[in-house]
Image (cartoon, coloured by chain):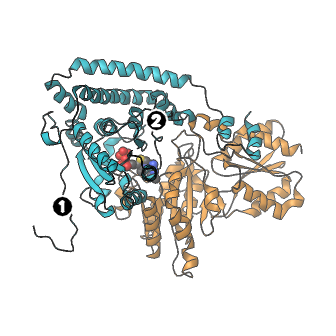
């Protein structure tokens, strides 16, 4: 095709993939370097996350959890992307991205406390480089860019990853973050989990761009698209992006094409906006099934392993939710005291109403 | 007359105006196909088509700016901001651009926009979904702020807001969407913006409230009545502008007042009401006017929400204080 000189490069991009839905390697060159132990650990985390999600939805129905956004279907993007990073790297999540910060070190019972609306849920332990899930869509993208600027100024080799959805990629904050990261060549990884819907709004009504990855072009950063149901492809893409960041080559926008099997939140009904056929089509791409097939062929995994991990996960979730439930309740006085380093006089007075 | 809850009443108002005026358009995140996260606009896209009721991408500033642009074009946009805490993304468009359009263009352009948003505590929602941010909006000139407390008012105020040639910020309390049904007339009627409503007659003290707090104050007044104290309750309905005449007339009768707001205490609507009472009725007062409000902290995580929000007991205690002053 001859290019018109004033036309911006705008062809379809293909998503990076390593595993086929049948668990066959389709792109040996792109296979990330991982030991057998690492492969099993990644599988363990995905199965654990699925079980945790199932339990969380039930706990929510029983009134034992509060705000919770389901994640099933997105295990490959969530588990794979943080797995590809170092402990010292920083994670800035959106509201659905609890698994990433838990796998990066936030104790699970604190995730439950956060969901139950307890302040202590957000008291991140020292040495765990994460923010709490952000409710304002897009705000965390700018924090990630700023944290990356900090690493750059301090001449540290860490990278920062931040997450949003296909919906989040429409916010002004998203573009501002990308643009700054481009200008300052920041070690930021903008990871968009494109699960096809923003609450009820389909991707086709979110953007007219060919892909979200294309949006990197305007910011002068690297944009890549990856099969988000393929954990190995996700790891490959994030590792490459992290390496670029550490080498001073700047930011990467990664669009991972994925699907959440459950509705947007526990209170909505997906049948109002998605079809059964579509759901079935995506079920067939289940990232856990795909990885299991791959590992089974290598003799690294079996159904018994899956069953064992599920039991372990259930036991851990039960123990951690109990720990959350036993944590001393917050009080309004405690809340008032947490506003400032030194509680001002008028707030001291206001405490009287609550004692 | 039909029985409607507040959500149905607001929807009915929008339907009436979509039918009456081809310039009315509705848009926002998820408002079209499924009718919004609270289904307030449910069915309207089916009825009026996706040129008049449509989903937007997830971008509040663009939603606000589109409303401003459509206003310039002569439309009457109803823009939904999905939850109150997300107005911050759009505040430049709402408070700076829309609210100044008439002034900046010497009246050539106006912003006949309704910004609708759910808000209001006690539902244990995620952060920034429930905050009572009306004080923030009322501090800005050029925009009216409406907070209905019942289905009848909600419909009449919504129709008035859509017909208003200036921007109106319309706040719908989450706890009131389904709380109860009431008689709501079919078809058109308006409730005047800027006019308060005396919802309970009393002679001993005036309780000024709005939104959900009208109901909390009513519970307190029931308790107080058992103890022989007759409270008059005024529902502001509109917090900008404030109907000071209705308040002053009541205070002249009762000589005592308290103001209840769900929002944090300092520098809010209650402070404004008290300042205006001082300006116009200080010699009629037997006691200082007290505020019952949330403490000056961020809106708390769900655990302490119920203790943090004003309760009937705290309202009754404040009334006792002014009675015994
Ligand atoms: C600034 C802002 N606007 C609106 C919302 C309400 N909201 C919560 S989730 C959501 C859709 C997000 O979709 P997407 O970014 O695709 O992420 P997904 O939920 O699909 O993972 C919306 C509109 C919000 N939290 N913040």
Residue B199 to residue B140: above or below: above
Q: Is residue B155 visible?
A: yes
Q: Residues within 10 Å of mark 1 (few under 14, many from 20)?
A: few
The image quarter containing residue A93 is: top left
Secondary-structure class at tag 2: loop
* For the residues bearing labels 1 and 2, Cβ distance under 8 angstroms: no
Secondary-structure class at tag 1: loop
Q: CA distance from mark 1 to mark 2?
A: 40 Å
**Marked residue chain, label 2:** A
Task: Name the front one of labels 1 and 2.
Answer: 2
Can you tell which chain is drawn orange?
B
Please give the residue where the numbered disc 1 appears in the rendered image.
Answer: A11
Residue B123 to residue B246: above or below: above
Can you tell which chain is drawn cyan?
A
Please give the residue where the numbered disc 2 appears in the rendered image.
Answer: A128
Of pointers 1 and 2, the one earlier in the residue sequence: 1
In which quadrant of the rendered image does the C terminus of chain B lie?
A: top right
């Amino acid at each position: 095709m001859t290019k018109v000189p004033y036309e911006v490069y705008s062809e379809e991009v293909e998503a990076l993939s390593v595993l086929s839905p049948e668990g066959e390697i389709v792109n040996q060159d792109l296979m990330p370097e991982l030991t057998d132990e690492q492969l099993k650990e990644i599988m363990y985390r995905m199965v654990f996350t699925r079980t945790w999600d199932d339990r969380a939805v039930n706990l929510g129905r029983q009134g034992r959890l509060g705000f919770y956004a389901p994640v099933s279907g997105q295990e490959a993007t969530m588990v794979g992307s943080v797995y590809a990073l170092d402990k010292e790297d920083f994670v800035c999540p959106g509201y659905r991205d609890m698994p990433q910060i838990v796998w990066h070190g936030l104790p699970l019972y604190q995730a439950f406390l956060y969901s139950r609306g307890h302040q202590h849920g957000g008291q991140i332990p020292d040495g765990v480089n994460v923010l709490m899930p952000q409710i304002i869509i897009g705000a965390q993208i700018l924090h990630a860019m700023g944290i990356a600027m900090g690493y750059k100024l301090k001449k540290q080799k860490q990278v920062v990853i931040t997450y949003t959805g296909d919906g989040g990629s429409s916010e002004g904050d998203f573009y501002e973050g990308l643009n700054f990261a481009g200008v300052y060549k920041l070690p930021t990884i903008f990871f968009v989990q494109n699960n096809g819907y923003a609450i009820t709004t389909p991707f086709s009504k979110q953007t007219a761009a060919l892909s979200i990855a294309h949006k990197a072009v305007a910011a002068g950063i690297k944009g890549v698209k990856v099969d988000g149901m393929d954990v190995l492809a996700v790891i490959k893409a994030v590792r490459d992006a992290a390496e670029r960041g550490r080498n001073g080559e700047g930011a990467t926008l990664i669009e991972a094409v994925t699907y959440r099997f459950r509705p947007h939140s526990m209170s909505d009904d997906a049948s109002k906006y998605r079809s059964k056929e579509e759901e079935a089509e995506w079920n067939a791409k289940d990232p856990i099934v795909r990885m299991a097939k791959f590992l089974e062929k290598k003799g690294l995994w079996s159904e018994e392993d899956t069953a064992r991990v599920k039991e372990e996960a259930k036991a851990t979730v039960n123990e951690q939710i109990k720990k959350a439930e036993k944590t001393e309740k917050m009080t309004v006085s405690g809340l008032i005291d947490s506003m400032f380093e030194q509680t001002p006089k008028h707030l001291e007075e206001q405490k009287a109403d609550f004692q | 007359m039909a029985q409607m809850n507040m959500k149905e009443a607001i929807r009915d108002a929008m339907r009436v105006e979509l039918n009456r005026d081809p310039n009315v358009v509705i848009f926002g995140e998820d408002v079209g196909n499924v009718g919004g996260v609270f289904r307030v606009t449910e069915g309207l896209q089916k009825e009026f088509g996706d040129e008049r009721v449509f989903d937007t991408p997830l971008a509040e500033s663009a939603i606000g700016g589109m409303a401003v642009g459509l206003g310039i074009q002569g439309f009457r946009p109803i823009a939904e901001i999905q939850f109150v805490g997300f107005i911050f993304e759009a505040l430049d468009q709402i408070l700076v651009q829309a609210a100044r359009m008439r002034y900046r263009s010497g009246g050539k352009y106006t912003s006949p926009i309704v910004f609708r948003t759910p808000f209001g505590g006690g539902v244990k929602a995620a952060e920034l979904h429930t905050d009572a941010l009306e004080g923030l909006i009322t501090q800005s000139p050029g925009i009216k702020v409406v907070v209905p407390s019942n289905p009848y008012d909600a419909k009449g105020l919504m129709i008035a807001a859509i017909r208003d040639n200036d921007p109106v910020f319309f706040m719908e309390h989450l706890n009131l969407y389904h709380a109860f049904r009431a008689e709501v007339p079919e078809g058109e009627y308006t409730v005047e913006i800027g006019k308060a409503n005396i919802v309970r007659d009393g002679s001993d003290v005036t309780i000024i409230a709005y939104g959900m707090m009208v109901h909390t104050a009513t519970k307190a007044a029931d308790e107080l009545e058992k103890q022989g104290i007759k409270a008059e309750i005024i529902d502001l309905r509109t917090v900008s502008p404030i109907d000071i005449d209705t308040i002053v007339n009541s205070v002249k009768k009762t000589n005592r007042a308290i103001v209840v707001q769900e929002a944090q205490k300092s520098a809010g609507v209650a402070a404004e009401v008290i300042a205006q009472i001082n300006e116009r009725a200080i010699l009629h007062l037997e006691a200082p006017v007290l505020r019952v409000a949330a403490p000056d902290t961020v809106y708390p995580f769900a655990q302490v929400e119920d203790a943090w929000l004003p309760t009937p007991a705290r309202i009754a205690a404040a009334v006792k204080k002014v009675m015994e002053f």
